[in-house]
């Protein structure tokens, strides 16, 4: 395909944001190469929750219908949480309601999402087993990626979509020793249980409708049905956090390890009937030591290098909003880079506009996500019911109701006012 632009793009990272970026940019005729550290054969299987804002971004990027087809859902639907006491008798504390005009959302198995997006991408665009070790600005002004296999790739622009442990983020921060990454003493125990197994085991709480958050003291459990895999299953995630310990530096990698049913039951031994049954059937759970970017980055760019997704704002997952913020990043960046007047010489100005809009928005969601986790973990007894009923309403409204197109209009207006873009019949 003939290229439509006078610049080339390298995407470091072939995860959710990296692949979606590649599809949207390559469709526009831009020269794109994706470098993914893994072979994808070891891709972790977990559920991905796409909120209404994420769904809108993916629709705008032209990939949502393909993703939906792999989810085994006929259409997106609202996924409003029920908050339930983890202690007997499992009273319903609050059923979330939203004023969002289009609350349609989607839950999908992560490998199913990746397979869907990969099907839209020319295989020649992506290279596997390419672990980036550093980013360097070359003498001729190009951005240079160095890889563990000794190879080097140059591009006019680098998109850092390399996740929470981002190498590209170190370049943007200008520090090899500080990656702005911490362990907040929070672990997530994950697994899947066939729906029929829990129904037959006597769980009384309805698990096949609304997503359920069992709230407790220092811990909570997220439960929701998931499609896109062979057997209809319930996705289970138990979050356990020690709020008495100070935040720690990044833990040694890997952060995912095998756990046992007994370890999890020991940590949640005070929970009631239904959560106990669920944990009894959560065989061989994986334990994920959750990390977050802290302090939050005030800039997502350096030279012609830009961060998206967890590389920019890896956050705690308590609003299910991290991936959605990544897709918002990608949506705005793609609108800028595919504009008819986007050229190699004005890339710095385009990235500057991205950097004005995205950090305040994504960092605000990062903070709100941390606060939501503390909220879910503050339930010790029925006496706390009233407090949660006051604090839970509205926690998703700013996340879900965000107007992506308003951001696009704002940055384009700035580019025209500053004469980076010229008003013409084709650009109006």
Image (tube, grey):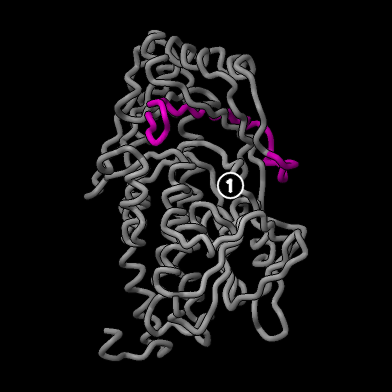
Q: Nearer the viewer, residue 269 or 218?
A: 269
Residue shown at 60%/60% (left/top)?
Answer: 127
Report the side of 9 relative to 228 (left or right). Answer: right
Q: Is residue 241 above or below residue 139?
A: above
Residue shown at 62%/55% (left/top)?
Answer: 128
Where, by quadrant of the figure, is residue 146 drawn? bottom right
Q: Is residue 263 above or below residue 212?
A: above
Q: Is residue 6 above or below residue 176?
A: below
Residue shown at 64%/80% (left/top)?
Answer: 142
Residue 266: x percent and y percent? 62, 14
Report the side of 214 relative to 137 (left or right). Answer: left
Where, by quadrant of the figure, is residue 248 drawn? top right
Q: Nearer the viewer, residue 352 or 425?
A: 425
Where, by quadrant of the figure, is residue 338 drawn? bottom left
Q: Secondary structure at mark 1?
A: loop
Q: Residues within 10 Å of mark 1 (few under 14, many from 20)?
A: some
Residue shown at 65%/67% (left/top)?
Answer: 172
Q: Which residues are magenta?
A: 225-254
Residue 46: x percent and y percent? 50, 36
On whether residue 357 falls in the magenta region, the answer is no
Q: Nearer the viewer, residue 341 or 23?
A: 23
The reply to whether residue 378 is visible in this rendering is no
On whether residue 231 falls in the magenta region, the answer is yes
Say which quadrant the C terminus sits in: bottom left
The reply to whether residue 367 is visible in this rendering is yes
Residue 74: x percent and y percent? 25, 40
Q: What residue is pinned by disc 1?
A: 40
């Amino acid at each position: 395909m003939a290229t439509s632009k006078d610049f080339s793009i390298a995407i470091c990272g072939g995860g959710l944001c990296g692949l979606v970026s590649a599809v949207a940019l390559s469709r526009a005729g831009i020269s794109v190469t994706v470098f993914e550290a893994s072979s994808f054969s070891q891709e972790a299987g977990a559920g991905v929750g796409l909120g209404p804002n994420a769904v809108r971004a993916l629709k705008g990027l032209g990939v949502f219908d393909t993703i939906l087809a792999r989810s085994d859902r006929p259409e997106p639907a609202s996924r409003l949480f029920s908050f339930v006491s983890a202690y007997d008798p499992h009273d319903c504390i609050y059923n979330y309601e939203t004023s969002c005009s289009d609350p349609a959302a989607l839950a999908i198995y992560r490998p199913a999402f990746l397979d869907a997006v990969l099907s839209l991408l020319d295989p020649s665009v992506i290279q596997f087993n390419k672990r980036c070790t550093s980013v360097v600005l070359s003498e001729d002004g190009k951005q240079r990626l160095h890889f563990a296999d000794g190879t080097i790739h140059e591009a006019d622009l680098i998109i850092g979509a390399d996740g929470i442990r981002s190498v590209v983020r170190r370049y943007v921060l200008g520090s090899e020793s500080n990656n702005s990454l911490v362990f907040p003493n929070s672990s997530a125990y994950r697994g899947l249980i066939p729906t029929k197994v829990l129904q037959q085991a006597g769980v009384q709480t309805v698990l096949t409708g609304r997503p359920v958050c069992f709230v407790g003291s220092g811990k909570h459990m997220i439960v929701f049905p998931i499609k896109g895999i062979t057997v209809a299953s319930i996705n289970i995630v138990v979050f356990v956090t020690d709020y008495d310990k100070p935040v720690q530096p990044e833990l040694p990698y890997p952060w995912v390890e095998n756990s046992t049913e007994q370890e999890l039951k020991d940590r949640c031994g005070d929970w009631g009937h239904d959560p106990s049954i669920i944990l009894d059937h959560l065989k061989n759970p994986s334990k994920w030591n959750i990390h977050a970017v802290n302090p939050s980055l005030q800039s997502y760019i350096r030279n012609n290098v830009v961060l998206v997704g967890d590389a920019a704002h890896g956050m705690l997952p308590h609003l299910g909003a991290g991936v959605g913020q990544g897709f918002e990043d990608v949506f705005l960046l793609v609108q800028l880079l595919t504009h008819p007047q986007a050229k190699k010489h004005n890339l710095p100005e385009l990235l500057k506009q991205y950097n004005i809009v995205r950090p305040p928005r994504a960092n605000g969601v990062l903070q709100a996500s941390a606060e939501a986790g503390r909220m879910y973990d503050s339930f010790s007894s029925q006496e706390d019911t009233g407090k949660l009923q006051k604090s839970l309403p509205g926690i998703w409204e700013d996340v879900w109701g965000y107007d992506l197109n308003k951001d696009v209009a704002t940055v384009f207006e700035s580019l025209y006012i500053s004469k980076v873009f010229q008003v013409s019949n084709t650009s109006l």
